[in-house]
Amino acid sequence: MTAYEPVIGLEVHVQLATASKLFCGCPTTFGAAPNSQTCPVCLGLPGTLPVLNQRAFELGIRTAVALECRVAEVMKFDRKQYFYPDLPKGYQISQYDRPLAHDGHLDVAGGEAVKRIRIRRAHLEEDAGKLLHDPNEPFSYVDFNRAGIPLLEIVTEPDLRLPEDAYAYLVELKAILRALGVSNCNMEEGSLRCDANVSLRPSGAAELGAKVEIKNLNSFKAVKDALAFEMDRQRRVLERGEAVAQETRLWNARAQTTEPMRSKEEASDYRYFPEPDLVPFHIEAAAVERARRELPELPARHRQRLVEAYGLSAYDAGVLAQFRPLGALFEQTVAHYPKPKPVVNWIMGDLLGYLNGRSQDPETLVFQPAWLVHLLEAIERGEISGKTAKALFVEALERQRDPQELMQGRDVRQIVDAGELERLVDVVVSEHQKSVADYQKGKANALMFLVGKCMERSQGKANPQQLKSILQRKLAEPREAVS
Ligand code: ADP
Ligand code: MG
Ligand code: ZN
């Protein structure tokens, strides 16, 4: 049987973080009442003229530079014409043969090796409106608030090979876009969208196979799942001796399948022609240079620095660099409490656990480094037990308060007094004679059970190390001494 090699290319649309639309002054705020953010320009009324949003242009350049693209000396806009009810003008202003930028790349850590994914082009374009379908009505609604929202479309070369590569590319791209501050990358709000192209070819062949473009991908996981499904479907088609149809398919997340949407359109179907209302733009080399100088630290560099400066594992550094608020919390905490190990453990363990448990995006985290510093210092001074610290940490997160403040006026101090701990152990031992006997018969687990009971009884305030050694000592004594 022929072995096939998958070939994947991604087209990502990011909404640029501007206050107003690409060619008019309408606001871009998400969630406004339908059609409340429209004007004659974005509704395409006759006699109106588009004016390019300077900020969108700058954010586009910043992104292009971060992706090591060549920024065009002259870029121009074109009309991409098609008919659809969400497109008020009957055409979309996009860029065809003179995009903002081209020929960049993004290095993606796929498994062991780093893969370089070439970026074919990045161009500016306006978004379309949104159709709303009410199953109880014989018609649809249309909301033009999104019409004219600035997008940057970032297109890769077909350099990806596996669904996991595509996933890793998207994660890295999103981390970069967020580090740059060019987009909030919120997929639920449509600020980041991805179409995935995939084909198969016999292993070793130079020529590309017929590709399928998959749309309606609402998450990175959907991209991965849809690609895996589609590779499989195409393989079966080829193995039947048939040809894969070049077409656009929709991902059906519920059924976990792709469904045909339309046969593939060609560029010529769109009758692109230069947008006559916008002149070609000359891009100053100085502006590109400035953008390059002003680039913030990007995730790849950030990861490397976290490993080198703090001795973090590659995995921990990867997570902290992927989510800026976590990385910032780490570095600012370590600046005041210079022990990277416990700090990273709190962030990777308790904090991420808390966020994951509530499906909260780390990007929305509000937590002061000083709060973690206070907590760690209290543990180090022996004032609170690890268990109390964990509870205080969650409370600090939930109530947005400094743990130090939460501790005030509360009896949370750790019990380290030997006499007090001995009394506690005596009570627990007398109540759990069976476990005592088990331990003395050689069941080591029984000791941890008894420590646990002591912790419970002290409401988490006893020092577990001390408890353990008291228990070990007491249970090693002749049984009569235990009473
Ligand atoms: P279209 O004309 O459909 O937009 P392009 O050639 O411009 O197609 O490519 C769009 C995307 O599809 C790019 O990301 C590109 O890398 C990818 N692509 C192109 N050809 C193939 C192929 N045969 N298999 C997989 N991906 C492909
Ligand atoms: Mg395309
Ligand atoms: Zn408008």
Image (tube, rainbow, N blue to C red):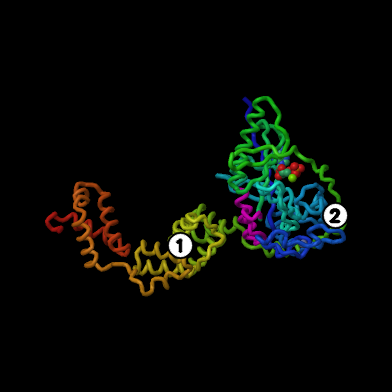
The residue sitting at 76% across, 54% down in the picture is 125
Cα distance between the residues tagged 2 and 1 = 55 Å
Q: Position of residue 322 (x, y in %)?
A: 57, 56
Question: Observer-nearest residue: 251 or 298?
Answer: 251
The answer to whether any part of residue 288 appears in the image is no
Question: Observer-nearest residue: 284 or 408?
Answer: 408
Give the amino acid at mark 2: Glu
Question: Observer-nearest residue: 124 or 373?
Answer: 124
**Number of numbered discs visible in the structure rendering:** 2
Label 2 CA crowd tier, 10 Å (few <14, some 14–19, many 20+): some
Q: Which residues are magenta?
A: 168-190
Give the amino acid at mark 1: Val
Q: Position of residue 353 (x, y in %)?
A: 46, 56
Label 1 CA crowd tier, 10 Å (few <14, some 14–19, many 20+): many
For the C terminus, the image quarter is bottom left
Residue corresponding to mark 1: 343
Tell me the SS state at disc 2.
Answer: loop
Residue corresponding to mark 2: 275
